[in-house]
Amino acid sequence: ASMRVERYLKGRGPRTVRVQTAITIERNGTSVGEDGIEPKAGERWKIYTDSRRQPFATSVCGGSKRVVSPPRGASAALTLWRAFPVQANPRPIVPLGEGLVLDPHTGLRTDAQEFAYLEGRYVLRTTLPAGSETAYRRLRAHRNGQHIKAPPLIIIGVRPGNATFVTDRGRMQLPSWRFYFRGVASPASVLALVPPDVFIAPPLHRFGQPGPGNSIEDSAKVSPSGKTIRLSFVGGPPGAAPCDENYRVSALANRRAVAFTIRTIAVPVPSGIACPAIGLIRTAVLHLSRPLGARVLVSASDGGAVPVTPAR
């Protein structure tokens, strides 16, 4: 087979070479070698050979193998986490879900309170305790306003406490500052940790088409060895019938993060058949060459981190 050379691992040579494959054309047909390579047009291969002349002899036993291109978006997703201090001890917390601020669990009593909270409009009627200044800035920055004018919420108390935050290592009880509002039954809890004890996740991006494998819906469990990760996500019904879907997971990794991609293997649907919009909890197993360790598990579709907890 003729192969175009992208680069040589050692030495130099022509840009196009001839390589012996597993298939040999005989007078009455073809024969297939047991350990020869079987490349197809468009594939990328890493070739090892002892030959000095073309066609170069090679085999899978000699180390030649197909090179699978990285999943789309995986490299970009890893780049988002290039600043993550994976070797830090202790490992920093990565808040997910609601992030740094947990809304009052009883909700807001009136529309005016809701609008003020969404706008980050507050008035202090108490003294901020020492160490709570960063938490107050985080509370004010936590906004998703509709630009509707409303009276500010009155902060009547700020006290230390603990709250359960979603992190890239599951739900964790962490120190927080509780902000009490006049007329609101429960407080808002703001994470009290500051860098280097906390690492703020980068914003989400859209690296691929919508589908399975996004950080918003997914979660994962890791084996005791750290090399097997079972991903849970929303997908279609399993099987081999029309409208069924099966999935395959792959990953690209570096020393700071592992970016996974979930590919859909859809069963062909005959014309005239409409598939129902059914979402089921599906799983896919990812096998790593080395333990996940302190690295972040991220989605290649949006670059967001996925909560990882130990498998039971």
Image (cartoon, grey):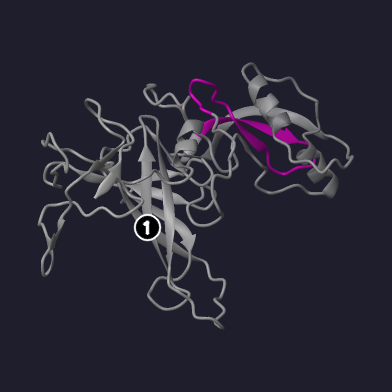
Residue, x 51% and y 50% (percent of image)? Answer: 214
Give the vertical position of 71 relative to 24 (above or below). Answer: above
Residue, x 49% and y 43% (percent of image)? Answer: 73
Give the vertical position of 11 relative to 64 (above or below). Answer: above
Q: Report x, y in % for residue 195.
A: 52, 21
Residue at the extreme front of the image, as rendered: 27
Q: Of the residues shown, which amino acid type is indicated by label 1?
A: Arg
Residue at the extreme bottom of the image, as rendered: 272
Residue 99 in the magenta stretch? The answer is no
Q: Nearer the viewer, residue 24 or 229?
A: 24
Residue, x 76% and y 23% (percent of image)? Answer: 126
With 116 as the anchor, is 228 left or right in this view?
left
Q: Report x, y in % for residue 155.
A: 77, 31
Among the 4 quarters of the image, the one containing residue 163: top right
Q: Nearer the viewer, residue 25 or 242?
A: 25
Residue 197 in the magenta stretch? The answer is yes
Sort mark 1 into few (<14), some (14-19) or many (20+) by Cα contacts within 10 Å: few
Residue, x 71% and y 30% (percent of image)? Answer: 141
Q: Nearer the viewer, residue 26 or 190?
A: 26
Span highlighted in magenta in the image:
174-199
Q: Report x, y in % for residue 87.
A: 36, 23
Among the 4 quarters of the image, the one containing residue 117: top right
With 211 as the anchor, is 296 left or right in this view?
left
Q: Which residue is mark 1?
A: 248
